Image (spheres, rainbow, N blue to C red):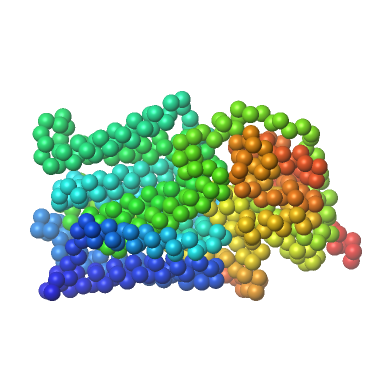
Amino acid sequence: MSFAIIMTGFVALYIFVLAGFAGWVIIGNVPAILHTPLMSGSNFVHGIVVVGGLYALFNAVTPQEQTIGFFAVLLGAGNAAGGYAVTDRMLAMFKSSDAKPAHHRASVHTIKKG
Amino acid sequence: MLVTISQIVIGTADLAAAFLFLFGLQRMSSPATAPSGIRVAGLGMVAAVLASFFYLASVSPAAQPHVMVNLALALVALAIGGAGAWFVGRRVTMTAMPQMVAIYNGMGGGAAGSIAAVELFGGHTQGATQLVVTLLGGLIGAISLSGSVIAWAKLDGVLKVPLRVRGQQYVNGAVFLAAIAVAGLVVASVLGVDGLLLTTPQWIWVFFACALLFGVLMTLPIGGADMPVVISIYNAFTGLAVGLEGFVLQNPALMIAGMVVGAAGLLLTMIMAKAMNRSIANVLFTNFGTVAKARPGAITGTERATDASDAAIKMRYAGKVIIVPGYGLAAAHAQQKLFEFVKLLVAAKVMVRFAIHPVAGRMPGQMDVLLAEAGVPYDMIFQLDDINDDFAGTDVALVIGANDVVNPAARSDKASPIYGMPILNADKAAQVYVIKRGQGKGYSGIVNALFYAPNCNMVYGDAQAVLVQMIEAIRGLGAAAA
């Protein structure tokens, strides 16, 4: 049994169509109030490109490939880490009226420190 | 054996990541569940990145001698990129969020473009399909990189004015066509066609140069108020580029994540464009500001100024108040003072709500985040469709640093450049106060009929300074009563 992943044209198209549709439906359910965290969150999700960067860098042969691969990982890692950091911070700020004001202030404070 | 194990580990981790991304985004359908959503997605990312080190077990024979160097480079890149962006991301102010999102977008696009470059320069692509997909992903990724950098520079104030040149659209079109043509030459060159003037690597360089140049040219003429659309589009572009490179690398996690983000970006772009009553093409290819200048204000009457304290006292004794924040609030960093003022009103039994226009600010939802940062509970924040009918029964509408999104000309004046754009009906409140820096026109240069309406008074000044005066006025009342 082989565990290698091989995708030819049509399989890839199926994945693209289904993923695009799933994304459209899921994102359509996000309320407008969360559009900024949604944007930074989806930003974070495309940070998965760092995995592709790692693959490219591991298989690099020439110094030129190594240099470009290095930047691919650098940028991808920045995309993922930064996207997560800002999204997590923003989402922690959204509170309902039921939340106790004192608790709210404390949480905002620690977030700023962290 | 090791290869099989690594395939199983990578396959499982990537599958988990793809599922957790979707599940995490799905939890963003409510502010209550959203924080757990991003953590779930983060878990998926960590799993996928850790598992990718198993790629080392099956590197190509040519790369075998370089494995240790490549591993070291990867660790350094992960550490610098990850730690640097994390550090900045934890500290950046909420008002700077649009430019941060722009720069993360650019990074993702740059990473996708770099992967394409490695595959092209290394000659790793197999067959024409992979080659074309690699080029397409590289093209979109590179455009997203340079375009996002320009968007960042504009949002950050490095670039102040939109740069517009006569015939720019033709230049942009020519550069884009050149990029496509060069991509065709790269394909021909890789497939072995001789006599193409340059070598394959040289054509690849030219290709990326054209793509990067197009990203710059495309973004330069777009003005600040159109930034919500631009950021959304580059979000979609980067997602698409990542998805395409995922196909090239035969990695379904990248394909799924990329396409989901591509769809998300497209949906947000359409929502933003609709909220401005413009097509996406119109935002990208026409010069909004110049259209507006062509038509001087045909409105008669004068703007009537009033005192901050008078306005504050009127609101203190009102029953219902709706506040309409705009980019001016963010620019003045006045959201904390605003909530302080609102808390005084609420303590005096005034019903206060916030009304947010979809394109208020410089990116989708920016106002919501700023209010949340100041501590405003999300159940006080309402979107256009949910609150627009309530203005008519409202005593006071307080507009802070917003302009076009409350211009009634969008409803009534067919000659206005913003005619047809959905607006917040602030003018239907019994009394309107507008806090504004000065008598100048707003960003788009369109005269706002609301400011001349009989039920409207202007409070001139910096939003923060005005709100401090308003807070003092109400505190003064309290002291007098006691």
Q: Is residue B395 left or right of residue B214?
A: right
Q: Is residue B236 left or right of residue B432?
A: left
Location of the N terminus of chain B (image quadrant): bottom left
* Badge count: 0
The answer, for residue B305, to whether it is visible in the render is no
* Residue furthest to the right: B481
Percent coordinates x, y for residue B116 in the rendering: 25, 49
Location of the C terminus of chain B (image quadrant): bottom right
Q: Is residue B139 left or right of residue B407?
A: left
Q: Residue at x 43, y 68 (%)?
A: B24
Front-most of residues B49 and B402: B402
Q: Residue at x 25, y 65 (%)?
A: B52
Q: Residue at x 79, y 50 (%)?
A: B431
Percent coordinates x, y for residue B407 in the rendering: 67, 43
Quadrant of res B301:
top right
The answer, for residue B192, to whether it is visible in the render is yes
Please, is residue B440 above or below residue B133 in the view?
A: above
Percent coordinates x, y for residue B162 in the rendering: 50, 34
Percent coordinates x, y for residue B103 in the rendering: 43, 49
Front-most of residues A49 and B429: B429
Front-most of residues B11 and B63: B11
Please, is residue B80 above or below residue B27 in the view?
A: above
Q: Residue at x 62, y 65 (%)?
A: B378
